[in-house]
Structure formats: C-alpha cells, structure tokens
Image (spheres, rainbow, N blue to C red):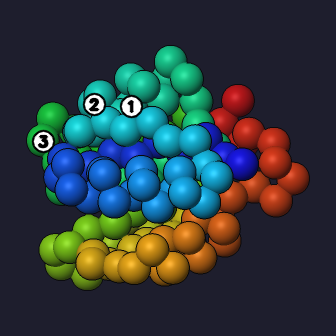
Amino acid sequence: MAQILIIDDDSDIRDFLEHTLNSAGHQTVTAAEGREGLNRFLRDPADLVITDLFMPELDGLELIAGLRTRFPELAIIAMSGRTPNMLSVARNMGSNEILQKPFSSDELLAVVQKVLPKDGARASR
C-alpha cells in the first residue's frame, strides 16, 4: 500500500486520518504544521500528501505550491473546515483533490484511492 504524509495542526484530525488510513493498509507519517511536513517529505518522500490549508509556520497553500513545483507528479489532497473557496484555490494551485471537513472515513478512502498512482510507483522519487 501507499506511504502517506498527513499534515494538520489539529491532533484529532491527524489521529482520525492516521487510524483510517492505517486500517486500510497504508503507512502513515504525521506532521503538526506545514514546515515540519515539508521537512519530513524532503527526508522521506511519500506517495501522497494530505494537508490542511490553515496552519502555523507554513500554510497548506504555500506547501502545495512548493511541493508541486519540485515534485510535479506527487499526489496531493487538500482539506479544510473553513471557507470552501480556499479549497478551490488549493485545487488551482495543484492539489489533485479536495476534502471539505468534516468528512467520513469512506469519503477519505475514496479520494485517496482516486489520487494514488495506479502502478504503485512513487511519483515523488
């Protein structure tokens, strides 16, 4: 299964994502904010990055823009519980898919399946 980096400053959301994705057979790594997430990705690239948009240090839009520039084939999912307009901005900046919080485990897994590389190859390496 996939290696997935989860970036969100809300520990409850990180725990929900981590539990749901691990239960589905994926391996997860978490970060509490954008800069930490970027550093983790650069040390150990993942198949998929799931990021919140509103975080301290480095927000999700900046993170998406930086990752997309350096890793154009990387699968990215943006999520937010705030304004839906920001999710549209995230999609325009390079997010493959978006999730409006709150969302169910089934919605999460469907979107993850949709964006993961079909051949199992890591697009980020």
Placement of 75 over or under 69, stated as above or below:
below
In the rendered image, residue 108, in percent from the top left (x then y), is placed at: 48, 72
Residue at point 81%, 48% (across, down): 120
Under mark 2, the amino acid is: Arg
Q: Earlier in the sequence, mark 3 or mark 2?
A: 2
Placement of 42 over or under 84, stated as above or below:
above
Left or right side of 108 for 34: left
Residue 58 occupies which quadrant of the picture?
top left
- Spatial separation of the CA atoms under disc 3 and disc 2: 9 Å
Left or right side of 44 for 5: left
Q: Which of the labelled discs sits on residue 51, or is there none?
A: none
**C-beta proximity under 8 Å, tags 3 and 1:** no
Residue that sits furthest to the top in the current view: 43
- Residue tagged by mark 1? 38
Q: Which of the labelled discs sits on residue 35, or is there none?
A: 2
Placement of 19 over or under 47, stated as above or below:
below
Mark 3, residues whose alpha carbon is within 10 Å: few (<14), some, or many (≥20)?
few
Left or right side of 32 for 79: right
- Spatial separation of the CA atoms under disc 2 and disc 1: 5 Å
Mark 1, residues whose alpha carbon is within 10 Å: few (<14), some, or many (≥20)?
many
In the rendered image, residue 98, in percent from the top left (x then y), is placed at: 43, 72
- Residue 114 visible within the image: yes
- Residue tagged by mark 3? 56
Task: Say which element carries label 2.
Answer: helix
- Residue 89 visible within the image: no
**C-beta proximity under 8 Å, tags 2 and 1:** yes
Under mark 3, the amino acid is: Pro
- Spatial separation of the CA atoms under disc 3 and disc 1: 13 Å
Placement of 47 over or under 43, stated as above or below:
below
Under mark 1, the amino acid is: Leu
Residue at point 16%, 74% (across, down): 82
